[in-house]
Amino acid sequence: MKTKQVTGFESDLMDKLRDPEFASAYIMSAIVDNDMNFLPVALGDVAKAHGVSKLAEETGINRRTLYKVFDKKGHPSFDLVTQIMQSLGMEIHVRPKKNKRSKAS
């Protein structure tokens, strides 16, 4: 049976993704860039860093389903994204967009 070897980069990324600030910025980058193909991958990377089995237990979603969600073709629902993020100790905040120039009153 083949086992996937983790590279130095992957190992370093997994270590960094255990930090809540780094993990939230990593996921937020997909949202800010509107990269919906990367969002499930980013969620999956953070989940793997924290343990997919633990996430499955906490959310009630089986591991096989989670791995399908974390595929770049996964397209998880907003509800599922927020459920996973909440289980990972994260939340989404919405704020007004910053304008480069102020509007005249």
Image (cartoon, rainbow, N blue to C red):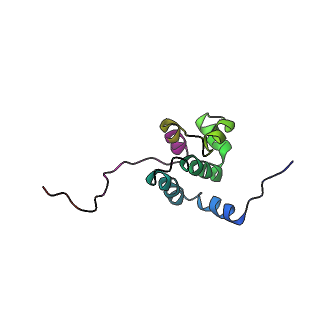
Tell me what residue is drawn at x 32 percent, y 53 percent: 97
Q: Could you tell me residue 52's position as x and y percent? A: 66, 45
Tell me what residue is drawn at x 81 percent, y 52 percent: 3
- Left or right: where 35 falls relative to 51: left
- Judging depth in this view, the residue of 47 and 101 nearest the camera is 101
- Left or right: where 70 falls relative to 91: right
Residue furthest to the right: 1
Residue 39 in the magenta stretch? The answer is no
Tell me what residue is drawn at x 57 percent, y 51 percent: 42
Q: Could you tell me residue 55's position as x and y percent? A: 62, 42
Quarter of the figure that contains the C terminus: bottom left
**Taking 53 as reference, is 32 above or below it?**
below
**Taking 12 as reference, is 45 above or below it?**
above
Q: Could you tell me residue 8's position as x and y percent? A: 71, 66
Residue furthest to the left: 105
- Left or right: where 5 falls relative to 39: right
The quarter holding residue 100 reads: bottom left
Q: Could you tell me residue 51's position as x and y percent? A: 66, 48
Q: How many marks?
A: 0
Q: Which residues are magenta?
A: 82-98
* Main secondary structure type of the part rendered in magenta: loop
Residue 93 in the magenta stretch? The answer is yes
Tell me what residue is drawn at x 24 percent, y 62 percent: 101
The quarter holding residue 68 reads: top right
